[in-house]
Amino acid sequence: MTRRVPIFATIIVLLAVATMVGLGVWQLHRASWKEALLAQYRQSLTLSSLASWPKDKAGVEGVLYRHSVIHCDKVLSLDALAGHNQAGETGWAQVARCQIRDAGQADVVLGWAASPQDRVQWAGGEVQGIISPGRDGEARLIASPPLAGLQANAAPDPADIPNNHMAYAWQWFFFAATALVIYAIALRKRLKGK
C-alpha cells in the first residue's frame, strides 16, 4: 500500500505557518515603530518650549510628554484615582475634570495624597505641567508644581510604556517552528505506516 503526503493537511499547515511568520514579521515592525515613538517621547521631556494643549484626540500623540500650561475655566468634578508620588509611594492622585476654553474637557492631576479621604477643594485656574496619556485617548496634565497643598504626583515617564513586540515576534516564530516540527513528525509516522 502506497503512503502519500496528505495534500489538504499540508496546505492547511503551511498556511498556518505562513500566517504565524507573517504575524512575527508584523511584530518586528511594531517593535521598531514603538522604539521610535518612545525615543520621541523621551526627547519631548527634554524640550523647554511649551506645547499648545491639543484641541482634539488627533493632536494628543504629537504633544505627549511635553510641558504645557492650561487654564481650567470650570472644575466639573474632583476624583481620586490610585497613583504614586515622586517617591514611589502608593496613594491617590487627586484629579480635576476641567472645562478648557476652545479645547473641550481635560483631566488635571492636581497632586498626590496618601488617603482617598484627603479630598481637595480647588476652583480652577492656570495649571502648568506635563502632558501625559489620559482616558479614552485624551491627554491629561500632571500639575508641576502640584496644586491645592498636595504632594507631587509621579512624573509621567515613557519608560512605563511597554515595548514587548519583540517578545511577541519571537513567540510567533516559535509557534511556526513548533507547528512545522509537529507536522513533520506526524508526516513521518504516516509515511512509515505506523
Image: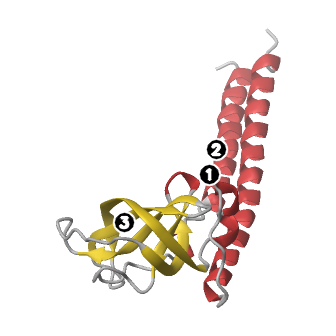
Residue 73 against residue 11 in the figure, above or below: below
Q: Quadrant of residue 145?
A: bottom left
In the picture of the structure, the residue carrying the numbered disc 2 is 175
In the picture of the structure, the residue carrying the numbered disc 1 is 171
Circle 1: is it few (<14), some (14-19), or many (20+) Cα within 10 Å? Answer: some
Q: Is residue 45 left or right of residue 149?
A: right
Decide if residue 4 is in sight here. no
Q: Quadrant of residue 22?
A: top right
Residue 154 against residue 7 in the figure, above or below: below
Amino acid type of the residue tagged 1 in the rendering = Gln
Q: Quadrant of residue 30?
A: bottom right
Q: What is the spatial separation of the Cα atoms under label 1 and label 2, in whole angstroms?
A: 6 Å
Sequence-wise, which precedes: disc 2 or disc 3?
A: 3
Which residue sits at x=64%, y=35%? Answer: 182
Q: What is the spatial separation of the Cα atoms under label 3 and label 1, in whole angstroms?
A: 39 Å
Circle 3: is it few (<14), some (14-19), or many (20+) Cα within 10 Å? Answer: many
Q: Is residue 41 left or right of residue 144?
A: right
Figure label count: 3
Residue 13 against residue 119 in the figure, above or below: above
Q: Nearer the viewer, mark 3 or mark 1?
A: 3
Amino acid type of the residue tagged 3 in the rendering = Val
Q: Secondary structure at mark 3?
A: strand
Amino acid type of the residue tagged 2 in the rendering = Phe
Q: Are marks 1 and 2 in contact (CB under 8 Å)?
A: yes
Which residue sits at x=45%, y=84%? Answer: 144
In the picture of the structure, the residue carrying the numbered disc 3 is 95
Depth check, front residue: 87 or 172: 87
